[in-house]
Image: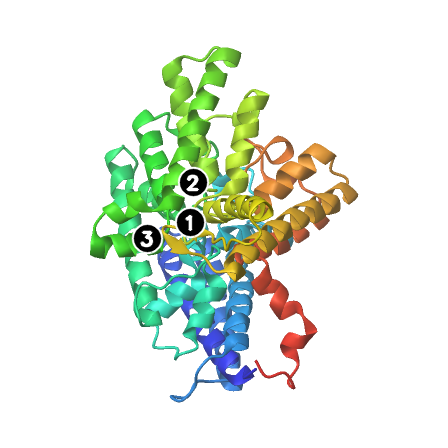
Amino acid sequence: MNRRIVAGLLGYLTLSCGAAMLPPFILAATTEEFNGAAAFLLSIFLCLAATFELERFGGLQDKDNLGAREGLAITCLGWLLISILGLVPYFAGGYLSLLDSMVESFSGFSGTGATVIEDVEILPRSILLWRSMSNWFGGLGIVVIFMAIMPQFGRGAMFILKAESTGPTKDRQMPRIRDNAKALFLVYVFLTVLCAGGYFLCGLEPFAAINHAMTTIATGGYGIYNDTVNQYGNVYLEYCMAFFMIVSSGSFAMYVVACKRGVGVIFRNTEFRTYLMIIFVAAIVIACDLVIEMESSPVNALRASIFHVASLSSTTGFVAHDFDMYPPLSKAFLMMTMFLGGCAGSTAGGLKVARIILLFKFVGLIVRQKLHPNVVHQVKLNGRTIDEDVVYGAAKFFFAVVMLDVLFAAIMMFDGIDFVNAISVSVSTMASVGPGFGLAGATSTYSLLPSFSKFCACGFMFLSRLEIFTVLAICSPSFWNKSRNW
């Protein structure tokens, strides 16, 4: 692995992180939030210092191209470095302890949206803006956004895109990697602006509209009020949020193709149609359950079910009502949608609907092979034959997610948390949802977790955002073995 190239590009990333802190710094300075301004000034200085050290050690040359190991290292180390630098404003400003600052930063950039802050309304606007920005940068991907605005990485840039993008397949819509990243970024920005405009028309003030738009399109879920969406009690806002959360759960690559070939591409996409069907069925079942068990009016039950199914299936985690008080059947369906997540190539977490489709088709293929062993069977998605490696990859990822869910739950039980709460927190963390049931329910925060569990949660959020195997790869000794030629 060429450490010079890795250090050079990490230096650009830390410089970009410092630049991203300028808007909250300017906001703090202009609104006389002197504590916040000092915290962001220190953070920017640390970003510049890290950039200087990295560039002194490394650097890029015109002939440089990235290999597989460089791409993995830049993606993993870049996420880790930015998440660590991102905690400085919380800690330096005295708003959170070091451990809680780490949880808040890792949760923000990973798009989990879990918070340890019990009263966000006492925070200055500059910190609230930084929380939302961390969600937004982490949603599409720190390195993908960086690739869209920085000079060409060379032919090896595809390794970075593959390492950071989510889902079983890594489709490209354009021949050049940077053009692909720019197209994704432009769609991301357009949807964020459109979402902010929609929220403004629904009655939100500009600052609230911008913050909630960033965290909606990123499916991160950070809010600026303790009651999040329930603060407003606005039915139009809830439906508007549900719409944009569902949109953000679709593949951004699909939207890029739709811009070229028309919106019919969206409705012909098998994964997105399946996702919409899951939302429809879950919302109807939950609404009926709320009417029968809680005697809610049909209108209010449908409103609540649509919003929370959209929120948890997209792994955004916005809360309009305390769904922790719902009947068992409703909670079971919400847990199911939380575990599945959105579509591949979206900003949502979870397993991804594409993997679930492939797993069901894989099971069906095995059954058909038992009945007709001499016939060649293929798994298809969107009319295209899927390679066996991709299908087996979906099965491996499912196994890894389940095992890590069990491991994190076991760690928390060892740390003193009961079985049910440990499972709930583990699933919501690994699915990048944030709120769950019980200890980390709709009206609770991760501040109730013991210190060791908080620290481990940071690692599991990091693993989940980079879809496990990318992180595990750089942890293997052979990755750093100079004698290995990748």
| Most foreground residue, 350 or 263 | 263
* Left or right relative to 157: residue 74: right
**Depth check: 279 or 109 in front?**
279
For label 1, count other residues whose C-alpha is less than 10 Å away and answer few (under 14), some (14-19) or many (20+): many
Q: Secondary structure at mark 2?
A: loop
User: Regarding mark 3 in the picture, which secondary structure is present there?
Assistant: helix
**Distance Cα–Cα, label 2 vs label 1:** 9 Å
The residue at 74%/45% (across/down) is: 410
The nearer-to-camera label among 1 and 3 is 3
Earlier sequence position, callout 2 versus callout 3: 2
Q: Residue at x 49, y 59 (%)?
A: 39
Q: Observer-nearest residue: 454 or 38?
A: 454
Identify the residue position indicated by label 3 in the image.
Answer: 254
Marking on residue 47? none
Residue 141 vs 473, above or below: the answer is: above
Inspect the image, locate mark 2, and give the three-letter code of the amino acid beneath it: Ile
Label 1 amino acid?
A: Ser
Q: Is residue 485 visible?
A: yes
Residue 71 % position (x, y): 50, 73
Q: Earlier in the sequence, mark 1 or mark 3?
A: 1
Residue at the (38%, 63%) spot, across then down: 145
In the rendered structure, are the residues bearing label 2 and label 1 in contact, judged by CB atoms less than 8 Å apart?
A: yes
Tell me which residue sits at (55%, 76%) in the image: 69
Amino acid under disc 3: Met
Labels 2, 3: front one: 3
| Residue 365 in picture, x, y percent from top left | 53, 48
Q: Nearer the viewer, mark 2 or mark 1?
A: 1
Residue that numbered label 2 is attached to: 224
Structural distance between the alpha carbons of marks 2 and 3: 31 Å
Task: Specify whether 118 is left or right of 307.
Answer: right
**Quadrant for the C terminus in the image:** bottom right
Q: Which residue is mark 1?
A: 132
